[in-house]
Image: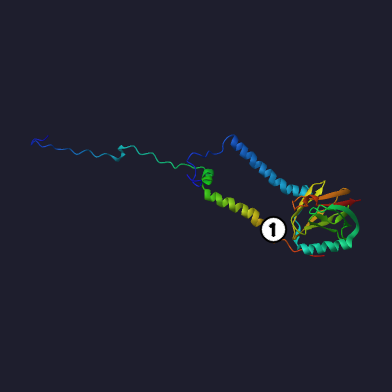
Amino acid sequence: MSEQGQVTQTPAPPVPETAQPPSPPVEEEKIHWLQKLMDNTWLLLILGVLIPTLSYTVWGLIDLLMIPPATIP
Amino acid sequence: MSALTPPPKGWFHAPHGAEKVWIGVALFWCLVLSIAMPFWHYAGKQTSDGEAYKISPQEYLGVVHNYIRENKVGEETVRVVNPVTEQEVETTIPITVPTADGHAYLVGHNWEWYPVLKLRKGEEIKLHISSADYQHGISILPMNMNFHVMPGYDHVLTITPTQTGTFDIICNEFCGIGHHRMTGRIIVTD
């Protein structure tokens, strides 16, 4: 309290920025690649159709188309 | 939760311990079987090398009838049961030898293998096989040599008989009501 009876407020000291402990860095959760694959239903669907189609159906059709005509004796 | 949404977090556990061992064993066995297939193709000596040609059933039947006319050495009489009428009838089947350049022709149709082939032990021949109607399966017994026979294709097997005797042929691809009576014969002599 001052001599005139007025209340004076002393300014609060500035808080240094280093006063608060730094927050720990957020670590990205590592997801196993197999889990990523298994969770991707559309990719699984595409692979499940594409791989047999290419390795079985398309390969077979190519084989059939490459059979030459017989030479009739 | 739909079937397409992934399950809640934490469902997946990376393979570990004994599970890893089993996956390793399974992969190793896949590898062994994958190598065994091409290996047995050459070492087994009972595998077709896939030689085939396109030919219509009518054309192939013409080839077979020409072959029979020029290479018939006899015929045998057999009694067969008509699978539709259940009547037993007597019929003759020609016995043929390979051509001079070592080709023999066999056709499968409902329901017989035609004609009877007479081969020489140790002589390599090109055995042509086709179907005049549906898909059949030729099974040469008792060696248990099996091949698919498709209409429209002349399948060529390079074979060398290694023992004498009479060998039965059956159809191992269900081809209709007379499938179980579809037989034929290969005679191998010295």
Whether residue B24 sits left or right of residue B69 in the image: it is left
As drawn, is B9 to the left or to the right of B97?
Answer: left
Q: Quadrant of residue B129?
A: bottom right
Q: Secondary structure at mark 1?
A: helix
The residue positioned 56% from the left and 52% from the top of the image is A46
Q: In the image shown, does B130 or B100 lie closer to the viewer?
A: B130
Q: Is residue A34 above or below residue B100?
A: above
Question: Which chain is disc 1 placed on?
Answer: A
Q: Position of residue B66 (x, y in %)?
A: 85, 64
Q: Vertically, is B38 above or below B151?
A: above
Specify whether residue B47 is in view.
no
Location of residue A59 in the rendering, given as x and y in whole percent from the top left corner: 66, 56
Res B16 → quadrant: top right
Q: Dot 1, crowdedness within 10 Å: few (<14), some or many (≥20)? A: few
Residue found at x 88% / y 63%: B69
Residue B135 vertical position relative to residue B2 in the rendered view, above or below: below
Label 1 sits on residue: A63
Considering depth in this image, is B147 or A66 the residue closer to the camera?
A: B147
Q: By what rule are the colours in the image chosen?
A: rainbow
Question: Could you say where residue A64 lies in the image, as x and y percent from the top left?
Answer: 70, 59
**Residue type for callout 1:** Asp
Q: Is residue B43 visible?
A: yes
From the viewer's perspective, tell me whether residue B33 is left or right of residue B128.
left
Could you tell me residue A40's position as x and y percent? 51, 48
In this rendered view, identify the residue nearer to me: B99 or B74: B74
